[in-house]
């Protein structure tokens, strides 16, 4: 097993830092997407609720068998 040099360790740490920053960016994007989905779901739920309130139920008569 070859020992790591200081330069090797610095390169590893910088790569890990870049990866952490990239993951943080992705989490931020996912948070925004989550908020947009939550907002869209709420609007859709409100629209469906409004539609159900306006829904007119027609009485169903008995069908004559032939």
Image (tube, helix red, strand yellow):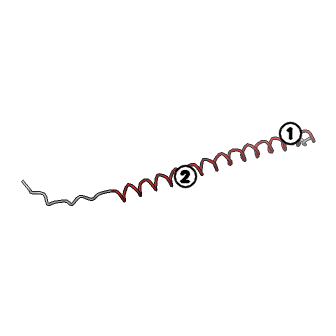
> Residue at position x 55%, y 52% from top?
39
Q: Nearer the viewer, residue 22 or 63?
A: 63
Q: In which quarter of the image is residue 16?
A: top right
The numbered mark, 2 or 1, whose residue comes first in the sequence reads: 1
Q: Residue at x 66, y 45 (%)?
A: 29
Q: CA gap, disc 2 to disc 1?
A: 42 Å
Q: Which quarter of the rendered picture does the N terminus lie within?
A: top right
**Left of 63 or right of it: where is 4?**
right
Tell me if residue 35 comes above or below residue 59 in the rendering. above
Number of marks in picture = 2
Please tell me whether mark 1 sits on a helix, a strand or a loop: helix
Question: Could you tell me residue 21's position as x and y percent?
Answer: 76, 44
Density class for disc 1 (Cα within 10 Å; few <14, some 14-19, many ≥20) is: few
Q: In this view, does 44 lie to the left or right of 27?
A: left
Q: Name the residue under label 2.
A: 39
Q: Describe residue 40's horizontal placement relative to residue 24 as left or right.
A: left
Give the secondary structure at mark 2.
helix
Seen at 14% across and 60% down, the residue is 62
Q: Where is residue 5 in the image (x, y as percent from the top left)?
A: 92, 40
Residue at the far front in the pictured view: 54
Q: How crowded is mark 2: few (under 14 residues within 10 Å), some or many (20 or more)?
A: few
What label sits on residue 11 in the rendered view?
1
């Amino acid at each position: 097993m070859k020992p790591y040099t200081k330069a090797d360790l610095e390169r590893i740490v910088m790569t890990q830092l870049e990866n952490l920053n990239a993951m943080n960016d992705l989490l931020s994007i996912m948070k925004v997407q989550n908020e947009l989905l939550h907002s869209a779901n709420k609007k859709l739920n409100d629209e469906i609720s409004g539609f159900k309130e306006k829904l007119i139920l027609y009485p169903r008569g008995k069908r004559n068998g032939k």
